[in-house]
Amino acid sequence: MSSAHDAVVLAQAEERLRQERELFDQRKSQDRKTFVLRLAMGWTAVVLLLAICALCGYVVLHNEDFASGTVTAATSALLVEALGLVVAVWRGTLGKGPAELGPTTSTTLPVAAPGPDEPS
């Protein structure tokens, strides 16, 4: 092999490594942002769940102060919230988990095409 061919192969390998490093950094950044978003959404859901349950629980416990339709709606909302919580926990626990981590670099080196002065 000629030194020119070696230089081309080396340049291709360096460029491939640079691109793979950028891809890794981009995925790492996206994973970090997705984690923060999921965490924020989870805490928002917990706060909303507690607020809805507290309001509906108040209506159910003080049912003599409210119309029967309001008490029925509050009871239904509690049922739906409880079922929604069970489904959310089920999906979060047994659903699709995080993507499996793996290397971003390949184990093979690229091979440059032979030059015009080299046999193919």
Image: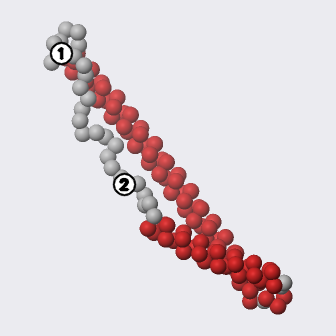
Q: Name the residue located 16 percent from the left edge and 13 percent from the top edge.
A: 119
Q: Quadrant of the C terminus?
A: top left
In this picture, residue 58 sits left or right of residue 80: right
Q: Is residue 63 above or below residue 88?
A: below
* Label 2 Cα crowd, 10 Å radius (few <14 / some 14-19 / many 20+): few
Q: Is residue 96 above or below residue 65?
A: above
Q: Position of residue 82 (x, y in %)?
A: 60, 77
Q: Amino acid at mark 1?
A: Ser
Q: In the rendering, at what x and y percent does residue 61 appear?
A: 74, 89
Q: Position of residue 75 (x, y in %)?
A: 71, 82
In the image, taking residue 66 as reference, residue 101 lies left or right, namely: left
Q: Is residue 7 visible?
A: no
Coloration of the structure image: secondary structure
Q: Residue visible at 24% across and 32% down?
A: 109
* Residue, far top: 117
In the image, residue 76 sits, relative to residue 96, either above or below, namely: below
Q: Nearer the viewer, residue 90 or 116?
A: 90
Circle 1 is placed at which residue position?
120
Residue pictured at 47% horizontal, 51% vertical: 31
The kind of residue on which mark 2 rests is: Glu
Find disc 2 in the rendering and name its residue: 100
In this image, 26 relative to 50: left or right? left
Residue 77 in sight:
yes
Percent x, y for residue 6?
Answer: 21, 21
Q: Is residue 110 left or right of residue 83?
A: left
Classify mark 1: helix, strand or loop.
Answer: loop
| Picture quadrant where residue 112 is located | top left
Name the N-terminal-most of marks 2 and 1: 2
